[in-house]
């Protein structure tokens, strides 16, 4: 398969302050992609951009709360103003509430839906015309196995990730004509702050590493031939196959 050169491309990575998003942002920058990173934590984003620059890459950040419905369009505008184009969108920001459905408040439900499902919708909507304008692009949705399975005490999160999956399937159909590809990645437990909330019993050696996810992202971006991988499901080596 012929490998696509990513040098000179421009990417937005949401939730880039730590965990999976940070690993993806670093990996994209190492490929010569200019990265627009976003999250709420300015301190962690400053550290990310410093790390990118020390490795010879290009990175800029914008501090944003994606709970604000105006944030996605503003982020796309800033990216175009800063880099002049947009090729790749990684919808990675996510949050979780670990409570039974009975205990989940309306505010918690709405926050989980806003960050995991609504923000990717708004970011994709704002990004696609600009990707079409440069002849195509790629949207990568960091979903979860919770996008196709269910776990007790993760009602809002599971609903949001199922919504993200459904939205991504329709988006892929609608933007195919513009040479925009939409990929979903569905990991099991990854070694980040988030998994500590849900499975504090698991040790890092039993978890997927953020770098493993970043490698898959780079594979999807560089192997852009006639064969398209719509969705990648990744499980921990010790968890049950096909669960
Ligand atoms: N860890 C896992 O086991 C696992 C498994 C499957 C899928 N995932 C998915 O992978 C993605 C990344 O998760 P992670 O494990 O890396 O978790 P994490 O370490 O908790 O990171 C979450 C990221 O999302 C950002 N974020 C959260 N709320 C935000 C808001 N209101 N506005 C803007 N940014 C916000 C956070 O930045 P700030 O706090 O600085 O805003 C942070 O950068 C999520 O979509 C998650 O659902 C994780």
Image: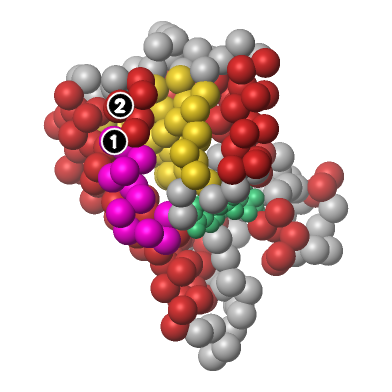
Asked whether the viewer can see residue 166, the reply is no
Q: Is residue 70 magenta?
A: yes
Label 1 Cα neighbours within 10 Å, binned few <14 / some 14-19 / many ≥20: some
Which residue lies most toward the bottom here?
Answer: 102
Circle number at residue 77: 1
Spot occupied by residue 111 in the image (x, y as percentages of width and height): 46, 69
**Identity of the residue drawn at 31% across and 37% down:** 76
Q: Is residue 228 left or right of residue 112?
A: left
Q: Position of residue 218 (x, y in %)?
A: 52, 24
Q: Are marks 2 and 1 in contact (CB under 8 Å)?
A: yes
Q: Which residue is mark 2?
A: 81
Please count the marks in the image.
2
Q: Residue at x 35, y 50 (%)?
A: 71
Q: Position of residue 177 (x, y in %)?
A: 14, 31
Q: Is residue 130 magenta?
A: no
Nearer to the camera, 214 or 78: 78
- Secondary-structure class at tag 2: helix
Q: Which residues are magenta?
A: 66-77
Identity of the residue drawn at 30% across and 27% down: 80
Q: Residue 179 occupies which quadrant of the picture? A: top left
Indicate yes or no: mark 2 CB to ligand 1 under 8 Å: no
């Amino acid at each position: 398969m012929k490998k696509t050169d990513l040098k000179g491309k421009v990417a937005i990575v949401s939730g880039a302050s730590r965990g999976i998003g940070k690993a993806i942002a670093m990996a994209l920058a190492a490929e010569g992609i200019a990265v627009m990173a976003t999250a709420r934590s300015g301190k962690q984003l400053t550290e990310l951009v410093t790390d990118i620059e020390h490795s010879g890459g290009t990175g800029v950040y914008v501090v944003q709360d994606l709970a604000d419905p105006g944030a996605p369009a503003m982020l796309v505008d800033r990216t175009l103003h800063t880099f002049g184009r947009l090729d790749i969108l990684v919808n990675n920001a996510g949050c979780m509430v670990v409570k039974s459905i009975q205990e989940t408040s309306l505010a918690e439900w709405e926050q989980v839906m806003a960050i995991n499902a609504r923000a990717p919708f708004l970011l994709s909507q704002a990004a696609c015309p600009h990707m079409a304008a440069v002849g195509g692009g790629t949207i990568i949705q960091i979903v979860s196995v919770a996008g196709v399975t269910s776990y007790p005490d993760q009602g809002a999160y599971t609903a949001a990730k199922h919504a993200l999956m459904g939205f991504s399937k329709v988006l892929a159909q609608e933007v195919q004509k513009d040479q925009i590809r939409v990929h979903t990645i569905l990991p099991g437990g990854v070694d980040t702050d988030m998994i500590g909330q849900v499975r504090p019993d698991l040790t890092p050696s039993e978890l997927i590493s953020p770098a493993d996810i970043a490698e898959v992202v780079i594979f999807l971006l560089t192997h852009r031939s006639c064969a398209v991988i719509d969705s990648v499901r990744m499980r921990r080596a010790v968890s049950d196959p096909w669960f």
